[in-house]
C-alpha cells in the first residue's frame, strides 16, 4: 500500500539531489492500481508546496521515468510571512516531497516549537516526527521540549512504551 520513490535531480547536468521515500499509494492521483502490468503512466503527487508530476512506465512493480515540479507560489508567500525566510524552488520541491505544509508548521509551533524554521520542519518530516509522536513521548516523561531531542529520540527508535520498560528494569 506504499510506493517507494527514488528521485535523482539534475540541474544543468550537475547532480544535486538524490531522494528516496516510501509514500502511501493513496497520496497519488491517477496512479494505476496494477503496477505489475507493463504500461506507460502519468500520475501526480499534489502537496501544499507544489505539484510533482510523474511520467514514465511500470513493469513488474518497478517504474522509471521523469519528474516535473510546479511550485505553489501562494504557499511560498504564506510560509515566508510566517517564518521570515525566503524560499527557493529547490526548497519548495523538498517541502512538497516531504509534505511540509502550513498545518504541519502551525501544529509543531503549537506544541511549543515557537521558533520553528522551515528547515526544522523539513528535518522533522525526514525523520518521521509527527505531533502524535511528540505528545506521546512527552506523556511518557521522555522530554521532548527541545526539537533536537525529539529528532534524536525518533532517529534512535525511542517510543512512548520505552520509558516504562526501562523503568521496570531499573533496580529500586
Image (tube, helix red, strand yellow):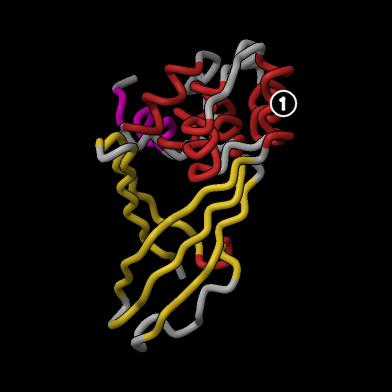
Q: Is residue 114 left or right of residue 140?
A: right
Q: Is residue 1 left or right of residue 87?
A: left
Residue 49 sits in which quadrant? top right
Q: Residue furthest bottom?
A: 37
Q: Which residue sits at x=66%, y=29%?
A: 76
Residue 166 lies in magenta, yes or no?
yes
Locate residue 133, reporting x and y percent. Answer: 54, 36
- State whether residue 153 is above or below residue 35: above
Q: Residue reaching furthest front?
A: 12
Above or below 98: residue 38? below
Q: From the image, give the main secondary structure of the stretch colored magenta.
A: helix
Would you identify the image quadrant in which residue 165 lies? top left
> Is disc 1 surrounded by few (<14), some (14 to 19) or many (20+) residues within 10 Å?
some
Q: Name the side, left or right, on which 149 lies relative to 95.
A: left
**Residue 62 image point, x, y percent:** 29, 73
Q: Where, by quadrant of the figure, is residue 100 drawn?
A: top right
Residue 136 coordinates in the image, percent (x, y): 56, 35
Q: What segment is highlighted magenta in the picture?
A: 162-170
Front residue of this view, candidates 40 and 100: 40
Q: Which residue is mark 1?
A: 77
Residue located 61% across and 35% down the image: 131
Please tell me whether mark 1 sits on a helix, a strand or a loop: helix
Q: Would residue 29 be counted in the magenta stretch?
A: no
Which residue shows up at 37% across the image and 57% down it? 5
Residue drawn at x 50%, y 39% is 93
Q: Quick check: 24 above or below 127? A: below
Q: Quadrant of the C terminus?
A: top left
Amino acid at each position: 500500500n506504499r510506493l517507494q520513490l527514488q528521485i535523482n535531480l539534475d540541474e544543468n547536468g550537475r547532480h544535486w539531489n538524490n531522494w528516496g521515500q516510501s509514500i502511501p499509494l493513496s497520496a497519488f492521483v491517477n496512479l494505476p492500481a496494477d503496477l505489475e502490468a507493463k504500461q506507460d503512466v502519468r500520475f501526480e503527487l499534489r502537496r501544499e508546496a507544489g505539484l510533482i508530476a510523474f511520467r514514465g512506465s511500470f513493469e513488474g512493480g518497478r517504474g522509471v521515468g521523469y519528474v516535473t515540479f510546479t511550485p505553489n507560489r501562494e504557499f511560498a508567500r504564506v510560509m515566508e510571512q510566517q517564518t521570515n525566510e525566503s524560499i527557493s524552488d529547490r526548497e519548495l520541491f523538498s517541502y512538497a516531497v516531504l509534505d511540509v505544509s502550513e498545518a504541519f508548521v502551525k501544529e509543531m509551533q503549537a506544541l511549543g516549537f515557537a521558533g520553528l524554521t522551515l528547515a526544522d520542519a523539513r528535518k522533522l518530516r525526514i525523520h518521521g516526527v509527527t505531533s502524535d509522536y511528540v505528545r506521546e513521548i512527552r506523556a511518557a516523561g521522555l522530554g521532548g521540549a527541545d526539537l533536537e531531542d525529539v529528532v534524536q529520540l525518533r532517529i534512535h527508535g525511542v517510543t512512548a512504551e520505552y520509558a516504562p520498560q526501562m523503568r521496570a528494569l531499573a533496580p529500586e
